[in-house]
Image (tube, rainbow, N blue to C red):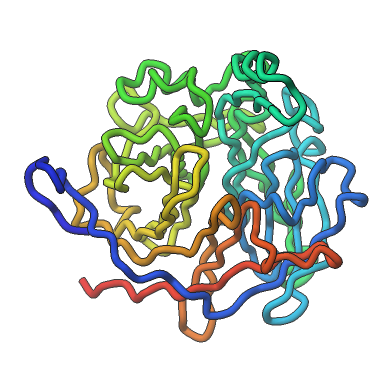
Amino acid sequence: MNDAGADTPGGRDNETTVPAETAVARRQVKLELASKEHLRHVDDPLHEDISAVAKAGNSLFLACDETATVERVVRLDDDRFGNHRSFSLGDIFDLPAGPEGEMDIEGLATDSGYLWIVGSHSLKRTKPKREKKDASDALDRMTEIEREPNRYFLGRVPLLEESPGLYAPVREAGGRRAASLKLSRRKSILIEWLHDDPHLAPFFDIPSKENGFDIEGIAVKENRVWLGLRGPVFRGHGVILELELKEKSEGVLKARRIDGERRYRKHFFDTRGLGIRDLRRDGQDMLMLIGPTMALDGHCHVLRWLDATAHATSGVVHADRVEDLFELEYGLDRDHPEGIETWREGGRTMLLVVHDAPAEHRLDKGDFALWADLVDVPPRPRG
């Protein structure tokens, strides 16, 4: 990323230089999941609807944006995970819309013995379903905006090591217990903290995929939590929110005041109009998957925010602190990069990439399996 100088035709302040390189998968990892007949909470085949990924030991956790569950597959050999098991978050938390209510889980992360989970916190406009409705009914449907309270979830669950490298999310383990932001059918406590924000407040009543408020990534370091926003995007700049969360009462997390009277920091990045689709902390740095904010096909890149954990003030992050590492392959109408996780092997750092609406070449419908990509992460620059 380089500065482009003044905001003039053909350039703008803090402009990103987009590299021509597209990452090529070093190899692929097979994820074997159960068929939907064995998962009554799933309307569509789970392996075609993965929205988030996180790794702990030999366990890989996945989420589908239409359920209130976390899925686990375990390493069977170097490049194959299976023995799928589904964990209902309704068994751990008293979810406001019940255990069957859609959570729209868009981010998973593991840190310090916990699995962190975040819902989109977004509104949803009803699809027109023109193939099933006449033109007038389809138009009327598009006036309907849904608010689903389970989407307003941000919390963590302890990971219990059942055997070496095999972890399960549980209510309590080793003195650690499950906790979340205060849950309510009527409101989101996170949006309450943000309600008067001069940048974000105008976007809370706009649905997701229309540049409305929409969380799609999470990264964690102990009690520090970063949330990547798919939307809104401001003058080409994507946003990461940072919180410091502590358990103030049993099972309830609350954010400290860390920016004057505010309980959050805001970090803006020149993303050339793209939203943040996932986050992953890599040591002191932050890897960011960026892609289209709207419901459309478009470029997807991975950026590296250098020394992110040392950045403790709100503001626009300077271009010299951000690298554009590579572009990821994407398809038309399908095969959109949706989740990332770091993968260490033989002294090499790679990135595991999972896709929403995966292309046919990623699927094995007979086995209800899909293939995720492993791509090399360029070395961190010295100094």
Observer able to see residue 371: yes
Q: Quadrant for residue 67, please give it.
A: top right
Return the x and y of residue 299 as percentages of the image width and height.
Answer: 42, 54
Q: Quadrant for residue 273, please give it.
A: top left
Return the x and y of residue 35 as percentages of the image width and height.
Answer: 87, 56
Position of 373 relative to 312 (above/below): below
Query: From the viewer's perspective, is 253 left or right of 39?
Result: left
Question: In the picture, which quadrant includes the N terminus?
Answer: bottom left
Return the x and y of residue 150 as percentages of the image width and height.
Answer: 68, 28
Query: From the viewer's perspective, is 68 left or right of 232?
Result: right
| Residue depicted at 27% across the width and 57% down the height | 322
For the residue pair 304 and 158, the one nearer the viewer reads as 304
For the residue pair 248 and 367, the one nearer the viewer reads as 367
Report the residue that reaches farthest toward the right: 37
Observer able to see residue 175: no
| Residue depicted at 61% across the width and 19% down the height | 142
Question: In the picture, which quadrant includes the C terminus?
Answer: bottom left
| Residue depicted at 74% across the width and 70% down the height | 81
| Residue depicted at 67% across the width and 67% down the height | 362
Return the x and y of residue 266 as percentages of the image width and height.
Answer: 33, 36
Position of 193 relative to 312 (above/below): above
Report the residue that reaches farthest toward the front: 135
For the residue pair 141 and 61, the one nearer the viewer reads as 141
